[in-house]
Image (cartoon, rainbow, N blue to C red):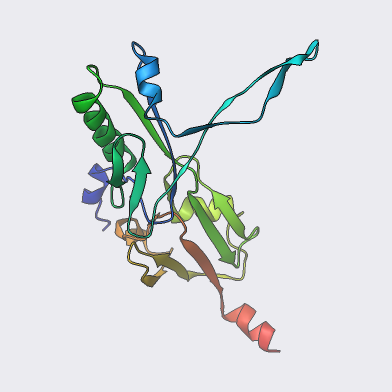
Amino acid sequence: EVDLSFATKLYDAKIMPKDILTITVTCPNNPDAASAFNLTVQSGNTANSINERNTFSSQIQLLPYLVTNEGYIDFPVLGQIKVVGMTKEELENYIAGRVQGTHLKERPIVNVTMSNYKVSVLGEVANAGMYTVSTGKVNILEALAMAGDMTIYGDRSNVKIIRENADGEKIIAELDLKDANIISSPFYQLQQNDIVYVTPNKVKAKNSGI
């Protein structure tokens, strides 16, 4: 029997050290005031059009935030914010509350995205490599599907997950894909920078030895 009681809560990725975050703050009724809370830089001058080669304008480029090893980002106006352990939604609500409470009368719209949410799939799969996850959520089965599924030499009873936690500690877990209860494992949903390694089965190991 498979325990599905945990499935009532949707998975949300936690922000980790070395994550790259893109954060935008907008306020429809006061865009100029909201712009102070966006980390931007002016890019090089570019021509407005082919017919106006001598007319140039600078473009504003949004810069990403790199989470420090201690779990902080340096946010405009608000200063240092400890973001490690927060979900995307929690950080959005936190920034919106701080900005509204001290600088703006209305609640701004805050959007946080993880720009470096990647997982690596190695071993006995059709297309080993590193895969970017735009949704910020991927489970072990979806990751294997992205890699073209396991080869006939993959051991479905021994798929390893290599994970580094927020303290830098590396953890290796073994999953048996033939066991339906893997969906209740804390390693079923992959975290950013997880490494999935599909070990070879006995047939492949024997052939390699020969």
Where is the N terminus found, in terms of image quarters? bottom left
Q: Name the foreground residue: 74 vs 54.
A: 54
Vertically, is 147 above or below 62?
Answer: below
Q: Residue 133: image x %, image y %?
A: 50, 45
The image quadrant of residue 106 is top left
Vertically, is 127 above or below 135?
Answer: below
Q: How many labels were placed on the picture? A: 0
Q: Which residue appears at 31% of the width and 52% of the height?
A: 84
Q: Is residue 127 left or right of residue 140?
A: right
One can see residue 26 in this view: no
Q: Name the foreground residue: 101 vs 151.
A: 101
Q: Residue furthest left?
A: 101
Q: Which residue appears at 44% of the width and 34% of the height?
A: 39
Q: Name the foreground residue: 64 vs 78.
A: 78
Q: Which residue appears at 40% of the width and 23% of the height?
A: 35
Q: Residue 117: image x %, image y %?
A: 47, 49
The image quadrant of residue 202 is bottom right
Q: Residue 19: image x %, image y %?
A: 43, 51
One can see residue 23 in this view: yes
Q: Is residue 118 left or right of residue 3?
A: right
Q: Which residue appears at 39% of the width and 17% of the height?
A: 32
Where is the C terminus found, in terms of image quarters? bottom right
